[in-house]
Amino acid sequence: MKVTTDNISTSTGASALSVYVRTARSGDIKPLSELLSSSFYRKAGWSRWVYPLLKLGISEDLRQRLRSAKAFYACLAAVHISSPNTGKQTDELIGTVEIACRQPYLWQVKEHSYVYLSNLAVRSDRRRRGVARKLLATCETVAMDWGFKDIYLHVMEDNPQARRLYGKAGYQIKETEETPLTWLGLSSRRLLLHKPLKKH
């Protein structure tokens, strides 16, 4: 599935960015792996020793998903178009998200397959400029093109910044999920968020 949107300018007080969203390509695997690794894992402390392995695992998983070419799967890339002082245009991959159709587990309240978002990430120096909102909006358009009327994602309860982003985008809590690690106080609860989709 191919996704391309018109160039847009996004700004929330910082300098405007010229951004477009497209489907990820095999040549994007390296920058996508770096983006996802740096967004979800720290390089400090003991984790710096396992960081290369985590990044390699992310790279191989992503490579497999891109090769699988499933009907209801897309990895989207947000690309920043910039013109350095040389006047030569460059394209920087600054954000990503994955969208896929999933089957409900036995314990989930959903009765049918549903669209699920995962791995939403924006490069740290390009955040708060509307890139994540653009990625979410593109996912919603893709889901409606696939014929779905709802969209789901998870967020950790102790991630207020992400919860604000999703709340402003119209997502609401559907379920609160706990695990033995949650009961022991070793992990935050996961919140399953839901948004009904409407054509504009």
Image: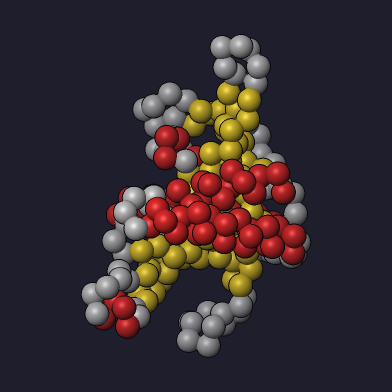
Q: Residue furthest top?
A: 86
Question: Residue 144: image x %, image y %?
Answer: 64, 58
Q: Residue at x 32, y 83 (%)?
A: 180
Place of residue 145 in the rendered image (x, y in percent of width and height, measured from the top left): 69, 56
Q: Is residue 199 left or right of residue 153?
A: right
Q: Is residue 150 left or right of residue 69?
A: left
Along the line of sight, which residue is nearer the eye, 42 or 180?
42
Residue 101 vertical placement versus 44 (above, below): below
Q: Looking at this view, name the residue that lies furthest to the bottom.
A: 106
Residue 155 vs residue 117: left or right?
left
Most foreground residue, 42 or 165? 42
Residue at point 34% right, 50% down?
A: 44
Q: Quadrant of the N terminus?
A: bottom right
Q: Residue at x 30, y 69 (%)?
A: 188
- In the image, residue 145 sits, relative to residue 80, either above or below, namely below
Q: Give above or below for 119 relative to 112.
A: above
Res 19 visible: yes
Q: How many marks?
A: 0
Q: Position of residue 66 (x, y in %)?
A: 70, 57
Q: Residue furthest front?
A: 49
Is residue 140 at least partly visible in the picture? no
Write the residue at 50% across / 54% down: 52
